[in-house]
Protein backbone atom coordinates (compact mmCIF):
# COMPACT_ATOMS: atom_id res chain seq x y z
CA UNK A 1 0.00 0.00 0.00
CA UNK A 2 1.39 3.39 -0.99
CA UNK A 3 1.44 6.36 1.35
CA UNK A 4 -1.28 8.04 -0.72
CA UNK A 5 -3.48 4.95 -0.34
CA UNK A 6 -2.74 4.88 3.39
CA UNK A 7 -3.85 8.47 3.72
CA UNK A 8 -7.12 7.71 1.95
CA UNK A 9 -7.90 5.04 4.54
CA UNK A 10 -8.47 7.72 7.17
CA UNK A 11 -9.29 6.54 10.68
CA UNK A 12 -12.56 7.80 12.13
CA UNK A 13 -12.10 10.33 14.93
CA UNK A 14 -14.61 12.54 16.72
CA UNK A 15 -15.17 15.87 14.97
CA UNK A 16 -13.52 18.91 16.42
CA UNK A 17 -15.74 20.72 18.89
CA UNK A 18 -16.64 24.39 18.31
CA UNK A 19 -16.01 26.40 21.47
CA UNK A 20 -16.77 30.00 22.37
CA UNK A 21 -13.90 32.45 22.66
CA UNK A 22 -13.90 34.04 26.09
CA UNK A 23 -11.64 36.82 24.90
CA UNK A 24 -14.47 38.71 23.22
CA UNK A 25 -13.48 38.04 19.59
CA UNK A 26 -14.76 35.46 17.14
CA UNK A 27 -12.07 32.79 16.64
CA UNK A 28 -14.11 31.21 13.82
CA UNK A 29 -13.43 34.26 11.71
CA UNK A 30 -9.76 33.39 11.30
CA UNK A 31 -8.42 29.83 11.09
CA UNK A 32 -4.91 31.26 11.24
CA UNK A 33 -5.42 31.23 15.01
CA UNK A 34 -3.94 28.05 16.48
CA UNK A 35 -3.45 27.50 20.22
CA UNK A 36 -2.52 24.78 22.67
CA UNK A 37 -4.86 24.77 25.65
CA UNK A 38 -5.33 22.79 28.84
CA UNK A 39 -7.97 22.81 31.57
CA UNK A 40 -6.55 26.07 32.94
CA UNK A 41 -6.58 27.96 29.65
CA UNK A 42 -4.14 28.77 26.88
CA UNK A 43 -0.69 27.14 27.16
CA UNK A 44 0.66 28.60 23.93
CA UNK A 45 -1.02 31.33 21.89
CA UNK A 46 1.56 31.49 19.11
CA UNK A 47 0.71 28.23 17.33
CA UNK A 48 0.05 30.22 14.18
CA UNK A 49 3.72 29.59 13.38
CA UNK A 50 2.75 25.97 12.68
CA UNK A 51 0.41 27.20 9.95
CA UNK A 52 3.23 28.92 8.09
CA UNK A 53 5.74 27.30 5.77
CA UNK A 54 8.75 25.44 7.17
CA UNK A 55 11.40 27.76 8.56
CA UNK A 56 15.11 27.61 7.77
CA UNK A 57 15.65 25.78 11.06
CA UNK A 58 12.91 23.29 10.14
CA UNK A 59 14.48 22.68 6.74
CA UNK A 60 17.91 22.07 8.27
CA UNK A 61 16.44 19.29 10.41
CA UNK A 62 14.35 17.85 7.58
CA UNK A 63 17.45 17.60 5.40
CA UNK A 64 18.47 14.68 7.65
CA UNK A 65 15.25 12.76 6.98
CA UNK A 66 15.18 9.91 4.48
CA UNK A 67 11.98 8.32 3.27
CA UNK A 68 9.63 6.91 3.94
CA UNK A 69 9.01 9.44 6.73
CA UNK A 70 6.26 9.36 9.37
CA UNK A 71 5.52 12.81 10.82
CA UNK A 72 4.00 12.11 14.24
CA UNK A 73 1.65 14.90 15.33
CA UNK A 74 1.93 16.64 11.96
CA UNK A 75 -0.60 19.42 12.70
CA UNK A 76 -1.29 21.58 9.62
CA UNK A 77 1.44 19.70 7.75
CA UNK A 78 4.25 22.19 7.22
CA UNK A 79 6.93 19.51 7.62
CA UNK A 80 5.02 17.13 5.36
CA UNK A 81 4.73 19.74 2.63
CA UNK A 82 8.41 20.68 2.92
CA UNK A 83 9.46 17.05 2.50
CA UNK A 84 7.04 16.53 -0.38
CA UNK A 85 8.63 19.51 -2.13
CA UNK A 86 11.97 17.68 -1.84
CA UNK A 87 10.50 14.53 -3.34
CA UNK A 88 10.64 12.60 -0.04
CA UNK A 89 7.94 10.01 0.61
CA UNK A 90 6.11 11.16 3.76
CA UNK A 91 2.87 10.69 5.69
CA UNK A 92 1.63 12.90 8.51
CA UNK A 93 -0.64 11.71 11.32
CA UNK A 94 -2.56 13.79 13.85
CA UNK A 95 -5.67 13.61 16.05
CA UNK A 96 -7.07 17.10 15.38
CA UNK A 97 -9.56 17.08 12.48
CA UNK A 98 -9.50 20.80 11.80
CA UNK A 99 -5.73 21.03 11.24
CA UNK A 100 -5.82 17.86 9.16
CA UNK A 101 -8.41 19.48 6.93
CA UNK A 102 -6.09 22.46 6.53
CA UNK A 103 -3.15 20.17 5.75
CA UNK A 104 -5.17 18.32 3.13
CA UNK A 105 -6.33 21.53 1.45
CA UNK A 106 -2.68 22.56 1.19
CA UNK A 107 -1.73 19.31 -0.50
CA UNK A 108 -0.11 17.47 2.42
CA UNK A 109 -0.54 13.68 2.56
CA UNK A 110 -2.00 13.08 6.02
CA UNK A 111 -4.38 10.80 7.89
CA UNK A 112 -6.18 10.92 11.21
CA UNK A 113 -4.85 8.85 14.06
CA UNK A 114 -2.34 8.37 16.84
CA UNK A 115 1.08 6.79 16.61
CA UNK A 116 -0.25 4.26 19.14
CA UNK A 117 -3.06 3.24 16.77
CA UNK A 118 -2.68 0.59 14.06
CA UNK A 119 -0.61 2.21 11.31
CA UNK A 120 0.08 1.40 7.67
CA UNK A 121 3.47 -0.06 6.76
CA UNK A 122 4.42 -1.06 10.29
CA UNK A 123 8.13 -1.73 10.55
CA UNK A 124 8.82 -0.07 7.19
CA UNK A 125 9.29 3.61 8.08
CA UNK A 126 12.84 4.90 7.77
CA UNK A 127 12.44 8.17 9.71
CA UNK A 128 10.01 9.30 12.40
CA UNK A 129 9.63 13.02 13.15
CA UNK A 130 8.87 14.18 16.70
CA UNK A 131 9.07 17.93 16.17
CA UNK A 132 7.26 20.90 17.78
CA UNK A 133 7.44 19.23 21.19
CA UNK A 134 5.97 15.94 19.96
CA UNK A 135 8.50 13.87 21.92
CA UNK A 136 5.99 14.48 24.71
CA UNK A 137 3.01 12.86 22.95
CA UNK A 138 1.39 10.07 24.91
CA UNK A 139 2.68 11.38 28.23
CA UNK A 140 5.73 9.08 28.43
CA UNK A 141 8.74 9.55 26.09
CA UNK A 142 10.00 6.02 26.85
CA UNK A 143 6.68 4.46 25.82
CA UNK A 144 6.73 6.56 22.67
CA UNK A 145 10.21 5.36 21.70
CA UNK A 146 9.26 1.75 22.43
CA UNK A 147 6.32 2.18 20.08
CA UNK A 148 8.57 3.65 17.39
CA UNK A 149 10.78 0.57 17.58
CA UNK A 150 7.84 -1.31 16.09
CA UNK A 151 7.08 1.41 13.56
CA UNK A 152 10.59 1.87 12.14
CA UNK A 153 12.84 -0.27 10.00
CA UNK A 154 15.75 -1.99 11.80
CA UNK A 155 18.03 0.88 10.72
CA UNK A 156 15.40 3.57 11.29
CA UNK A 157 16.01 7.01 12.77
CA UNK A 158 14.12 9.51 14.93
CA UNK A 159 14.48 13.28 14.55
CA UNK A 160 13.17 15.26 17.51
CA UNK A 161 13.41 18.53 19.39
CA UNK A 162 14.01 18.64 23.13
CA UNK A 163 13.17 20.69 26.19
CA UNK A 164 15.91 22.61 27.98
CA UNK A 165 15.73 24.93 30.97
CA UNK A 166 13.65 24.19 34.07
CA UNK A 167 11.68 20.92 34.01
CA UNK A 168 8.23 21.26 32.49
CA UNK A 169 5.28 19.42 34.04
CA UNK A 170 3.23 16.78 32.29
CA UNK A 171 -0.28 17.87 31.34
CA UNK A 172 -3.24 17.09 29.13
CA UNK A 173 -3.55 19.38 26.12
CA UNK A 174 -5.90 20.12 23.25
CA UNK A 175 -5.34 21.98 20.02
CA UNK A 176 -7.73 24.86 19.36
CA UNK A 177 -7.88 25.90 15.71
CA UNK A 178 -10.15 28.89 15.25
CA UNK A 179 -13.27 27.78 17.12
CA UNK A 180 -12.53 24.06 16.70
CA UNK A 181 -11.25 22.16 19.73
CA UNK A 182 -9.46 18.89 19.00
CA UNK A 183 -9.27 15.76 21.16
CA UNK A 184 -7.39 15.85 24.45
CA UNK A 185 -3.97 14.18 24.56
CA UNK A 186 -1.37 13.61 27.30
CA UNK A 187 1.93 15.47 26.93
CA UNK A 188 5.14 15.13 28.96
CA UNK A 189 8.20 16.64 27.26
CA UNK A 190 11.63 15.01 27.25
CA UNK A 191 14.40 17.10 28.77
CA UNK A 192 17.80 17.07 27.08
CA UNK A 193 19.41 15.94 30.35
CA UNK A 194 17.27 12.77 30.26
CA UNK A 195 17.81 11.91 26.60
CA UNK A 196 20.58 9.32 27.00
CA UNK A 197 18.76 7.32 29.68
CA UNK A 198 15.41 7.31 27.86
CA UNK A 199 17.02 6.40 24.54
CA UNK A 200 18.95 3.54 26.12
CA UNK A 201 15.80 2.28 27.82
CA UNK A 202 14.19 1.82 24.41
CA UNK A 203 17.38 0.43 22.82
CA UNK A 204 18.07 3.53 20.76
CA UNK A 205 21.43 5.21 20.48
CA UNK A 206 21.96 8.97 20.45
CA UNK A 207 23.54 9.67 17.06
CA UNK A 208 23.67 13.44 17.33
CA UNK A 209 22.57 16.37 19.49
CA UNK A 210 22.77 19.95 18.24
CA UNK A 211 21.50 23.44 18.89
CA UNK A 212 19.55 25.06 16.08
CA UNK A 213 18.60 28.71 15.78
CA UNK A 214 15.99 28.51 18.55
CA UNK A 215 15.71 24.86 19.61
CA UNK A 216 17.78 21.83 20.59
CA UNK A 217 17.48 18.73 18.41
CA UNK A 218 18.56 15.12 18.43
CA UNK A 219 18.88 12.24 16.02
CA UNK A 220 18.38 8.73 17.40
CA UNK A 221 19.18 5.43 15.71
CA UNK A 222 17.94 1.96 16.52
CA UNK A 223 20.62 -0.12 18.22
CA UNK A 224 20.82 -3.54 16.56
CA UNK A 225 23.54 -5.34 18.45
CA UNK A 226 26.24 -2.83 17.60
CA UNK A 227 26.77 0.90 17.66
CA UNK A 228 24.61 3.23 15.63
CA UNK A 229 27.36 5.03 13.78
CA UNK A 230 27.01 8.79 13.45
CA UNK A 231 26.17 10.03 9.99
CA UNK A 232 29.06 11.82 8.24
CA UNK A 233 29.86 15.25 9.68
CA UNK A 234 27.45 14.77 12.59
CA UNK A 235 28.38 15.03 16.25
CA UNK A 236 28.57 11.81 18.27
CA UNK A 237 27.41 12.01 21.93
CA UNK A 238 31.00 11.83 23.19
CA UNK A 239 31.86 14.95 21.19
CA UNK A 240 29.08 17.22 22.48
CA UNK A 241 31.37 19.37 24.60
CA UNK A 242 33.65 20.03 21.63
CA UNK A 243 30.65 21.23 19.60
CA UNK A 244 29.57 23.64 22.34
CA UNK A 245 26.71 21.65 23.91
CA UNK A 246 26.80 22.41 27.66
CA UNK A 247 26.73 19.58 30.16
CA UNK A 248 23.81 21.18 32.01
CA UNK A 249 21.38 22.82 29.56
CA UNK A 250 18.98 23.62 32.40
CA UNK A 251 20.75 26.96 32.70
CA UNK A 252 18.57 28.12 29.81
CA UNK A 253 15.56 30.20 30.76
CA UNK A 254 11.96 28.98 30.77
CA UNK A 255 11.06 31.61 28.18
CA UNK A 256 13.69 30.11 25.87
CA UNK A 257 12.12 26.68 26.36
CA UNK A 258 8.68 27.93 25.37
CA UNK A 259 10.05 29.82 22.39
CA UNK A 260 12.23 26.91 21.33
CA UNK A 261 9.85 23.96 21.63
CA UNK A 262 6.24 24.97 21.96
CA UNK A 263 6.56 28.10 19.83
CA UNK A 264 8.54 26.63 16.96
CA UNK A 265 8.96 28.84 13.92
Image (spheres, rainbow, N blue to C red):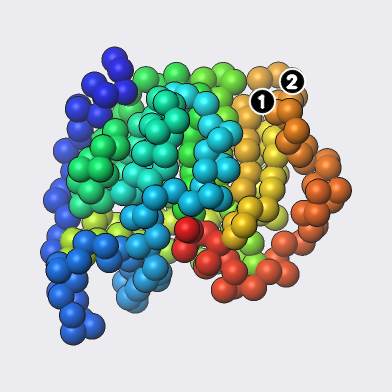
Asked if residue 146 lies left or right of residue 116, the reply is: right
Q: Residue 226 shows which numbered tag? A: 2
Residue 78, image x and y in percent?
38, 46
Residue 221, image x and y in percent?
63, 30
* Quadrant assignment for the N terminus: top left
Residue 88, image x and y in percent?
44, 26
Q: Is residue 78 above or below residue 263?
A: above
- Residue for point 73% across, 28% down: 232
Asked if residue 137 lies left or right of residue 56, the reply is: left
Residue 21, image x and y in percent?
19, 76
Asked if residue 74 lies left or right of residue 155, the reply is: left
Classify mark 1: residues with Cα within 10 Å, few (<14), some (14-19) or many (20+): many
- Rounded to the nearest whole Å, what is the CA distance between mark 1 and mark 2? 6 Å
Task: Find out whether the residues at labels 1 and 2 contact each other: C-beta distance under 8 Å.
Answer: yes
- Residue with the most extreme top position: 1
Looking at the image, which is closer to me, 228 or 216? 216
Q: How many marks?
A: 2
- Residue for point 38% across, 32% down: 84
Q: Quadrant of residue 12?
A: top left
Q: Residue 36 shows which numbered tag? A: none
Q: Is residue 114 visible?
A: no
Q: Secondary structure at mark 1?
A: loop
- Residue for point 42% across, 39% down: 82
Looking at the image, which is closer to me, 118 or 22? 22
Q: Residue 223 shows which numbered tag? A: 1
- Residue with the most extreme right position: 242
Amino acid sequence: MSIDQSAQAVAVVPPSVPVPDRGGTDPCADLRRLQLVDEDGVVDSDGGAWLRSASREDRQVLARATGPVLDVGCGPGRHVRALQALGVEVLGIDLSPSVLETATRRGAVVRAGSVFDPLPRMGQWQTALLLDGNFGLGGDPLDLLLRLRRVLRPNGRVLADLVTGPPMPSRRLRLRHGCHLGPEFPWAPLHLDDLDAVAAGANFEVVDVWRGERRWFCELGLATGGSAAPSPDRTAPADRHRSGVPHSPRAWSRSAVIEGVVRSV
